[in-house]
Amino acid sequence: MRRFPFSLLLALSLLAPSVSAQEAAEQAPAVQNAEPEASFADVEAIDTKTLTLLNRLRQENQRLKLQLQEAQTQVPLPLPLLSEEQKWFAVGGSVGVVSFLLGLLVTRGRRRRQWLN
């Protein structure tokens, strides 16, 4: 297998996208010229169709917004996960666990002192 210098490979990889972009640019005018020109009556017909469709979509949008507002007002509030006593119990338990872990971490590095009588 023949080895190419790294700089040659780098130059070829940088030039490849520009070559494909130039080919695409050359093909684009041919596609644009293939489209037939529309007459003025066709443009007016398209505009009226577009306007009626636009008005219908706006009305539909307003109707859906009203439905959304009604649905949001009818949704009941969710029940709380824990009651007030359960919240205090959970807070107390977590304080106990955290203090136990901190006590273990603080005393782990020290030796226990023996009391001398």
Image (cartoon, rainbow, N blue to C red):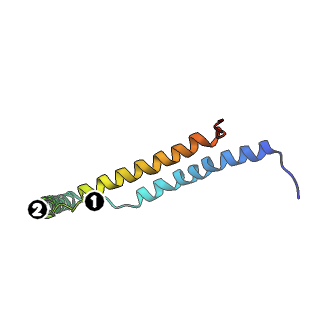
Identify the mark nearer the N-term, 2 or 1.
2
Residue 113 image position (x, y, % from top left): 64, 37
Q: Residues within 10 Å of mark 2 (few under 14, many from 20)?
A: few
Residue at (46% x, 47% y) in the render? 98
Residue 110 visible in the displayed image? no
Image: 61 above or below 22: below
95 or 27, nearer to the observer: 95
Image: 112 above or below 55: above
Could you tell whether 24 is left or right of 115 in the image?
A: left
Residue 22 visible in the displayed image? yes
Mark 1 lies on residue: 82
Quadrant containing the C terminus in the rendered view: top right
The image's mark for residue 99 is none
Image: 116 above or below 69: above
Q: CB atoms at circles 2 and 1 under 8 Å apart?
A: no
Mark 2 lies on residue: 70
Local SS, label 1: loop
Residue at (35% x, 50% y) in the render? 91
Could you tell whether 43 is left or right of 62 in the image?
A: right
29 or 11, nearer to the observer: 11
Distance from Cα at disc 2 to Cα at disc 1: 29 Å
Residue at (17% x, 63% y) in the render? 53
Mark 1 residue type: Leu
Residue 71 image position (x, y, % from top left): 14, 64
Residue 88 image position (x, y, % from top left): 30, 52
Residue 75 image position (x, y, % from top left): 16, 64
Which of label 2 and label 1 is nearer to you?
Answer: 1
Local SS, label 2: helix
Could you tell whether 10 is left or right of 63 in the image?
A: right
